Image: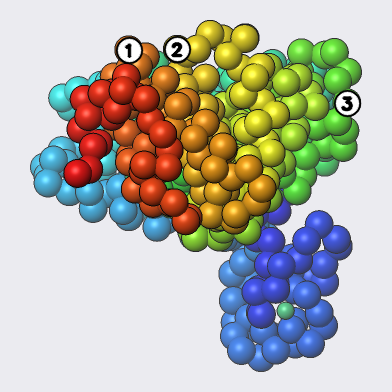
Amino acid sequence: MYLLTTCASCAAPLGSKRAKQCSRCKTRYCSATCQRDHWARGHQSLCKKIKKAGDAETYHANEKYKVAVAVAVAACAEDTKGQTCYICKEAIQRVNEEGLVSGHCACRGPAGFVHVGCLVHQSVTLIHDEAMDKSVAATKNAAYRKLGPKWRRLWFNCPRCKGEYCGDVQIALGWSCWCSHRLNQRDEMVNQEAYSIFARISVRALALRLFAKKHFEEARALYLALLNSVPPGTLTMDTGSTEASLEREETIGDMDKLAICHGKLGRADDELTARKLVHHATRSLFGRRATYATAIKLASVLLDQHYVHDALELLSDICPDVAGDLGFDHHLTVELFHLLCRARWMHHFYGREGYRDDLREAVTELLGLLGLNLTWEVSQPIRNTLRLALTHQLDWSLEDLNLDPSELEAIISAGLFRG
Ligand SMILES: [Zn+2]
Ligand SMILES: [Zn+2]
Ligand SMILES: [Zn+2]
Ligand SMILES: [Zn+2]
């Protein structure tokens, strides 16, 4: 798996096909022309340095690691003044000349100051002792999957307090985890397929941390790399094995995060595509009942992007089921019916036959929802939609709705009546 998915010279996406690469440092290019250009523009002087770090992928991860450490150290500068590392007992780490970080886990006081480099060294040593034993490496992939959670813990949790490291430290550890994985991969003694499982675990762990810190551009690239390397059949076949089903769920989780990244980065088309993928994959793997939450997210994106007809179709199809399955006052039922009403209101502007009945029905339904015992946070958006349905209409007026007295009263009590 590669996290560097674009041409180093022109940034064109390289896809999953074999790309041209620098024979020494494995920097990847879209074409021989780009490779020549890049060489002339400075790669010539960097190539040996990259090779020394391992290869282009490792060098990149290492650079990212250094930046993340610098950020973490700067953020802790005040707290760590005059302190020393609980591992190496120094203030400045000798090998990498790193400063200290603090508050990385639940350890407090002098036990809480440490170098990220010392944590990395500690993880690598523990992993070498416990998990990277060559005899384990030679066994089946299943053994590796079981080692997955342990690998994650060894990288991201403090061995003393068992707490997870937090903040910028996590991101630095995420990059060094990927870096160390890449270096292990060059070891020919080790089962390559098993390593691809660890690659996914490492990248997913890093992506999740970047996502949590709102580094959406970087997280997006990582989720794309993960999804490009999904083992064939993961999302289409149910083999019945627990490992495969775990991988499936995690892959759908990756797609969900990717959709959020797209949305945060303003990539509307990509967001919609990803939302559809999540919804359809969930449906084909786990059945209709599993899709209420994914339908809400998909319908919201469809409505935001004014694909009103598609949203209406999706919601009309799913709403009758959700009420029967979960009951009328379940939050998913309420949310789906609210979106259905919103879709009907938006759709009536297109003036298709029977649109007045649709709008009338939406108003009745929204009043019904407001009649449920909902919290203020839940009912507020519903009130907003009702307000829109009552005040923004195509070619008729509030009077045309022929509201009956009880409905009028409900509208007045919801504070929505306009004179
Ligand atoms: Zn190029
Ligand atoms: Zn090179
Ligand atoms: Zn240290
Ligand atoms: Zn701790």
Camera-side residue: 144 or 238?
238
Quadrant occupied by the C terminus:
top left
Q: Quadrant of ligand 1?
A: bottom right
Residue 171 is marked as none
Q: Determine which residue is flagged by label 3.
A: 237
Q: Which residue is drawn at 70% across and 89% down?
A: 37
Q: x, y percentage for residue 106? A: 27, 21
Q: What element carries label 3?
A: loop
Where is 304 relative to 144, above or below? below
Check disc 1: other Cα within 10 Å, few if <14, some if 14-19, many if 20+: few
State the residue in front, 256 or 275.
275
Q: In this view, does 67 lie to the left or right of 265?
A: left
Is residue 172 at least partly visible in the picture? Answer: no
Q: Residues within 10 Å of mark 2 (few under 14, many from 20)?
A: some
Give the residue at x 65% y 74%: 11
> Is residue 306 at all visible to an observer of this figure?
yes
Vertical position of residue 317 compared to residue 227: above or below: above
- Percent across and percent down for residue 237 are 88, 26
* Some atom of ligand 4 lies within 8 Å of the CB belonging to the residue at label 1: no
Residue position for label 1: 373
Hey, what amino acid is under mark 3? Met
Identify the residue under disc 2.
329
